[in-house]
Amino acid sequence: MIIILYIAALIFALAFTALVVYLIKVLKETERTMGSMANTLEGLETQMEGITTETTLLLNRTNQLAEDINDKSQRLNTVVDSVKGIGDTVNSFNQSIRNVSSTISHVAEKNKEETAQVIKWGTVVMQLFNKRKGNNENPYSNL
């Protein structure tokens, strides 16, 4: 029976040795993997710092562009307001011309008969004047 006990102890020792060898291999592979991960994370950290710097610069440029666009938009609004004012002035001027034209047309229509009478009398006066002038030029024509 003691032999069985020695054989069991030998099997246990071999199994324990195999387990320790396997654990050593696993731990060495884990150490290598962890070292690789550490290198990868260091590279990633460096890249993230570069990305952060670039993002900050891009954000600053975007803010500057937004301010520039806002400034130019304000200037453009001033120009648009000025053009609107000119348009309003032109419309007012056109309306004034329409009113004057309408008033002149109305007055002319209202005084149409009086104007015709004045023209007739003016024609008669001119004819009389021309007749008299013609008579004054030739004083012997009545003889």
Image (cartoon, rainbow, N blue to C red):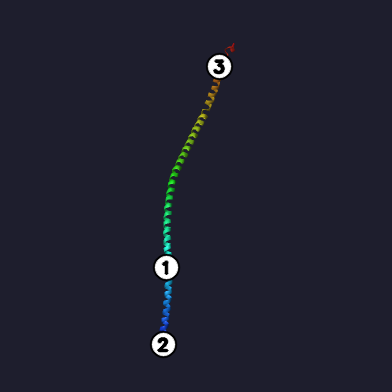
Residue hosting label 3? 133
Q: Quadrant of residue 34?
A: bottom left
In the picture, the quarter occupied by the C terminus is: top right
Label total for image: 3
Q: Which residue lies at the image location 43% right of the left edge and 48% below the top edge?
A: 68
**Location of residue 50 in the rendering, given as x and y in whole percent from the top left corner:** 42, 58
**Location of residue 4 in the rendering, given as x and y in whole percent from the top left corner:** 42, 87
Q: Residue furthest top?
A: 143
Q: Is residue 68 left or right of residue 115?
A: left
Q: Secondary structure at mark 1?
A: helix
Residue type pointed to by label 1: Gly
Along the viewing direction, whichever of 1 and 13 lies nearer the viewer = 13
Residue hosting label 1? 35
Residue hosting label 2? 3
Residue type pointed to by label 3: Lys
Label 3 Cα crowd, 10 Å radius (few <14 / some 14-19 / many 20+):
few
